Structures are given as C-alpha cells and as structure tokens.
Amino acid sequence: MVPFWLDLVLLTASVVVLLYQGFALVLALEMPRLAPAPPNPAAASLPKVSVVIAARNEELDLPDTLDCLFAQDYPNLEVIVVEDHSTDRTAAVTDARAPRVRRITPPPLPPGWTGKNWACWVGARETSGEWILFEDADVHTHPSAVRTAVEWALREHADLATLAIKIEMQSFWERVVLPFYVQVVLTYFRTPHVNRPNSKTAMANGQFWLTPRTVYYAMDGHEAVRSVVLEDVAIARRYRAAGKTLRVAWTPELAQTRMYRNRKEMFEGLLKNVHGTEFSSARLIGSLAGLIGLFLLPLGLLPFGLAMGDPVLIGMGAFLYLALFAKHAVFARALGVPWPYGLLFPVAVGYYVVLVVTSLARGLRHQGVAWKGRSYPMGP
C-alpha cells in the first residue's frame, strides 16, 4: 500500500490538474462570439478603413485573401499589400488585381527590425483611413467581416479590436497539434479576460486586428516593438499599459486561415512563437515543467495505483484519464476537428515539449529566430 502522506500529495496534485483543465473550459465558455452582422443601411457613414497586408512569399494564399477583401460589403475600404522582397510571384498576383489593391515595396530591412514589423510600419504610413486593419496574407474573410468588426469596435469604444479566427486543419499533424496550441494560447493569455475593463490581461491576434489611426500613431505602432517576433501581443500590452480599451472575440464564421501547409512549416512557425527574440531560460523551464506536470505525469497515476493496489489512486487515476481525454476530444470537436484527434493529446504535448527543449537549447547557444528566410538575433 502507498503511505498516507504520498496518497495525500498525489491526490492534491490531481486536484490541481483538474482545476487547471477546468479553467481552460471556463475560459472557452467565457469567450465572446461575434457572428456576421446583418446588413446595415447606414454603412456608408462608417469610417474609412485601410487594410495593410504584409506579404512575403505568399503567392498561394494571397489571391484568395485579396478576393475576399474585394467582396466585402464595406463601402469605404483601402487595400495595401506590402510586398516584402518575395522570391515567388507575390508581386505578380498583387499587381494582377490593381487598381483595387496598391502594392508597396518597403526599403531594405533596417537593423533591429523584424520583417513583418517593418512591412506593417511602412504600410501603415501609406494609409489614408481613419482605422487601420492589419490582416495576414492567408486570412479568408466573410463578406461582412470588416463591417462587423468595425461596428463591433465602435460599439465597444475599442482602441484595439482583434478577432480570434478559425484555424483550418487538414493534415494529421495539424489536427493533432493545433487544437492543443489553441488551448495553450487561451489559458496562457486568459484570452476572454482581455475584455474586462480593469484587467491587466493583454493580447491580440496579428492575423486580424484593427485600431484607430490616431491611437496607432500615438502608441508608436510597430515601431515601438520593432524587434519583437510576437508583435501583436507586445502592441496589445503597450495599449493596455496606456489605459487603452482592448476587445477580442471568437469569430469562426467571419474569418478562417490555414496557418501552416506542411509539418516543417508548422514546426518552424510554432518554434518562432515559443522561442521569440526575448530569451528567458526560466520561462522555458517553467513551460516545460507545466507541460509535463499538467498533462503527462497525471496519466501515470492510474498505472501507479494499479501497481500499488491502492483503490483511492486507481479511482482518481481513472477519473483523470476520463477528464483529460474527454476535455481534449471536446476541444478538438469545437475547433472543427474530428473528436478522436483529441485523444492523441499526449502526442501534441510531446510535440510541444520538443519545441520548448529546442528553443531552450538554441537560446543557451545564443541562436536567433529563423523565419521566412531571415534570422533575427536574440535579446534578453
């Protein structure tokens, strides 16, 4: 039999695990949902919006993204593509849609800037709209997406409004890993708490976020976070620190994206997000401990209880199995993935462990971030 004190420790740890898993479900239920708005006869009075798309080697996704923007029911829309020295046909597919879109080629990347931040900053300076919408080159939008987002931002008096868009997952690895990625983002940033007036929580989704032009420049926009890879979160934190109003909503009907087209691209993209340019070994070690302690070690309680013949641990271990696998199956289904993929969540956790270990090893060797053919140095 297991000593009483060890029973108590393991049961306490199990309760902590269950509370954390339950917290993720509570956050998901709290997440506000924004659906396409009904037609607005007064839409002509809405402010002019300038859409800025930073595009580097996006010939496959950009055409559909632009065509979706051209189909918007927003009456006063300006579209600017900042073609960031691509080596494919990004410039050609953009020019083929002129004059509905204006293509800009930014000057060479200055020292201390990431490519996306520089492209967004250059593009923003060419805009004429009262609001600026930053959208990724692989986002496909509903015809009322821009109008719905602007009307919502105006109702909420938002200084930064961002959409949590639907991620399309087609391959095996996308369906296994990305539902877990969504959970990590949801719990790490406590996403729905962004909408609370007195909350210190701040995040934005760089795939689709909009802000009044005057506020963007007052906050120095992308220039203020020029070297940061997770620029959307950094900008949101600056807005929050300045007392600005942030809003976020879950919008699967308004916008979708396929973030990664293959396993190699997915690993590099997620590693970029984990690694960043602001290295902290303590943060990464804490993340590693959290991944193992909250998702993998609890799965060992049932076999340990069976080996020790402890009915209490067997019961708690079985309940943990049921809770963990059921929760991840529900999350997978809610994100549009067949629920059996949720049962493979230990594989997703192992994938993330590899990402964190890789980031830690690279950081300790002072290796920078590589993305889209560029490398950015590490900072503290």
Image (cartoon, rainbow, N blue to C red):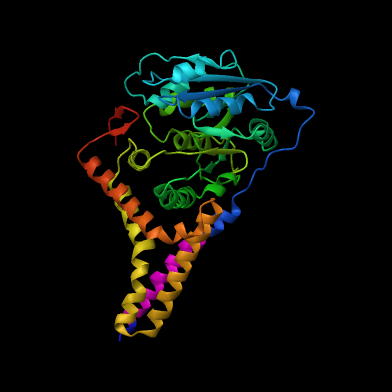
- Residue 107 drawn above or below residue 327: above
Of all residues shown, which one is farthest toward the left?
A: 365
Say which of 292 and 142 sits in front. Answer: 142
Q: Is residue 167 magenta?
A: no
Let me know if residue 341 appears in the view.
yes
Q: Could you tell whether 222 is left or right of 243 in the image?
A: left
Dominant secondary structure (helix, strand or loop) of the stretch shown in magenta: helix
Say which of 99 and 250 sits in front. Answer: 99
Q: Is residue 22 magenta?
A: yes
Say which of 345 and 2 sits in front. Answer: 345
Say which of 281 and 132 sits in front. Answer: 132
- Residue 7 drawn above or below residue 247: below
**On the rendered image, what quadrant is the C terminus found in?**
top left
- Residue 214 drawn above or below residue 325: above
Let me know if residue 122 appears in the view.
no
Where does residue 36 sit, x and y in percent of width and height?
68, 39
Task: Tell me the residue at 47%/34% (across/down).
Answer: 232
Where does residue 265 sit, x and y in percent of width and height?
36, 38
Q: Could you tell whether 259 is left or right of 264 in the image?
A: right
Task: Tell me the residue at 48%/14% (across/down).
Answer: 104
- Residue 349 drawn above or below residue 373: below
Q: Which residues are magenta?
A: 5-24
